[in-house]
Amino acid sequence: MKKVLKTIGWLLLIALVAIQFFHPKKNIHEGDQPNAISKKYSVSADVKLILNKACMDCHSNNTRYPWYNNIQPVAWWLNNHILDGKKELNFDEYIDKRPRFQYRRMEQTIDLVKKEEMPLDSYTWIHKDAILSEEEKTKLFNWAQSIMDTLKAQYPIDSLKRQGPPPPQK
């Protein structure tokens, strides 16, 4: 039994070393982002600071990677968070989306921050500066609401809000 455990331990160590050579592609796209939210909507310096510290690592095309991203399987875990975040909302690919999408994402931004579901707890454990104060939340809410108001001024409200029952949960 002791020999079996020793063999399993060695195999796990070899596997852990081997996976260190396989890393996902990093989410770094330097240069102009032609579809960034700031190309169409005003983003004040205060809001930009809030977005940079609490949102953009997972919701943009440029992630600031921590040192522990160089360790597997952590890099895969972080990459999954980033891919999921960008799939839901990517501030660098925002204005090429339909107005309904843009409107709904601002509604969801307000809702998720109010419920303290964003930023994720797993993010704020390490990034303490991403924990938003009430003042920062208010600034973020007002900014998101201003985008929604701009969209409502440009499009009929029934084209911005979802009609009918919500889609089935996966």
Image: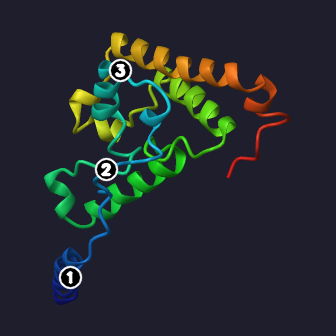
65 left or right of 120 in image: left
Instruction: Give the x, y percent position of residue 103.
Output: 63, 30
Instruction: Give the x, y percent position of residue 61.
Output: 37, 51
150 left or right of 158 in image: left
Instruction: Give the x, y percent position of residue 146.
Output: 54, 17
Which dot marks residue 134?
none
On the image, numbered disc 2 is attached to which residue?
Answer: 62
Frontmost of labels 3 and 2 is 3
- Report if the CB atoms under discs 1 and 2 are less than 8 Å apart: no
Q: Answer with the quarter of the image where residue 12 lies.
A: bottom left
The colour style of the image is rainbow
Amino acid under disc 1: Ala
Write the residue at 19% across / 88% down: 7
On the image, numbered disc 3 is attached to which residue?
Answer: 44
Amino acid under disc 3: Ser
* Mark 2 residue element: loop
Write the residue at 50% across / 32% down: 40
On the image, numbered disc 1 is attached to which residue?
Answer: 18
